[in-house]
């Protein structure tokens, strides 16, 4: 698999492959004319011949969903991507394949493919790539959609905090999944001063105390800010 994957990711014909062609190859329904026109399909056919179980076919489909997101990158960018991921333990291609193995849906494979594209074109560094890869693997993708909503509410709260109309409309129950993913954290505000209010006339009743409240504050974490920076790149095409 590694050999065929390497051939495909480094092929200048990658942009010519579509998911329809991938389906035809996996279904053994591809014509010689198309193979002659797009020779790199031979590598996919070879992979299908070697890895023929249903589980293998699903993995091939997942891998191709990742690679197709790299279709509009150039050959040099894709080669640099694999070289940057190389280390003494495994090659860059092996690392991508191992990451794909931990993606349970095709939608996650598309998002991971877009992440690979960001790394290939130099928009993120290696550490950011690894952190976001782990996040995509661990997350329920719909939960990640809560992050822009939280960010907008925090901005709105900041803009209105001195307004008479201000009220805290952020509830932890709504954003709890983001806590578990490390995309947000919470802290307590300083306690508001306690003041004694004395009656100004006999009609006011006895003295009473105000203040002492502690507000729960919410913040987007460093990882959350990283995801927000590239959220549109990763999810703009989400169906």
Image (spheres, helix red, strand yellow):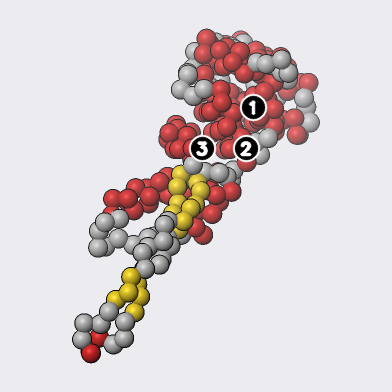
Q: How many marks?
A: 3
Q: Residue furthest left?
A: 201
SS for callout 1: helix
Residue drawn at point x = 30 percent, y = 55 percent: 161
Residue drawn at point x = 55 percent, y = 33 percent: 132
Q: Relative to the observer, which residue lies in front, 198 or 30?
A: 198
The numbered disc on residue 63 is 1
| Real-space CA distance between mark 3 and mark 2, rounded to the nearest whole angstrom | 14 Å
| Earlier sequence position, callout 3 versus callout 2 | 2
The numbered disc on residue 97 is none
In the picture of the structure, the residue carrying the numbered disc 3 is: 223
Does residue 132 sit above or below 194 in this rendering? Answer: above
Tag nearer the camera, 3 or 2: 3
Residue drawn at point x = 56 percent, y = 26 percent: 127
SS for callout 2: helix
In the picture of the structure, the residue carrying the numbered disc 2 is: 137
Give the side of residue 195 with respect to residue 78, left or right.
Answer: left
Does residue 105 sit above or below 18 in this rendering? Answer: below
Tag nearer the camera, 3 or 1: 3
The x and y percentages for residue 137 are 62, 37
Give the side of residue 231 with respect to residue 140, left or right.
Answer: left
Residue drawn at point x = 76 percent, y = 21 percent: 49
Q: Residue furthest bottom?
A: 202
The x and y percentages for residue 202 are 23, 90
| Earlier sequence position, callout 2 versus callout 1 | 1
């Amino acid at each position: 698999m590694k050999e065929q994957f390497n051939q495909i990711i480094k092929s200048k014909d990658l942009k010519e492959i579509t998911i329809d062609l991938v389906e035809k190859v996996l279904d053994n329904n591809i014509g010689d004319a198309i193979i002659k026109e797009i020779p790199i399909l031979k590598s996919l056919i070879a992979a299908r011949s070697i890895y023929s179980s249903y589980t293998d076919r699903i993995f091939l489909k997942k891998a191709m969903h990742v690679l197709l997101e790299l279709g509009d990158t150039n050959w040099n960018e894709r080669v640099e991507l694999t070289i940057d991921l190389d280390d003494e333990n495994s090659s860059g291609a092996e690392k991508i394949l191992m990451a794909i193995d931990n993606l349970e849906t095709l939608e996650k494979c598309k998002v991971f493919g877009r992440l690979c594209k960001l790394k290939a074109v130099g928009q993120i560094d290696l550490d950011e790539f690894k952190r976001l890869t782990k996040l995509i693997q661990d997350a329920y993708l719909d939960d990640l959609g809560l992050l822009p909503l939280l960010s907008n509410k925090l901005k709105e709260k900041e803009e209105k905090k001195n307004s008479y109309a201000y009220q805290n409309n952020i509830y932890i129950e709504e954003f709890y999944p983001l806590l578990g993913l490390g995309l947000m954290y919470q802290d307590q505000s300083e306690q508001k001063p306690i003041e004694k209010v004395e009656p100004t006339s006999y009609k006011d009743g006895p003295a009473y105390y105000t203040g002492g409240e502690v507000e729960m504050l919410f913040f987007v974490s460093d990882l959350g800010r990283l995801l927000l920076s590239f959220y549109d790149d990763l999810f703009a095409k989400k169906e």
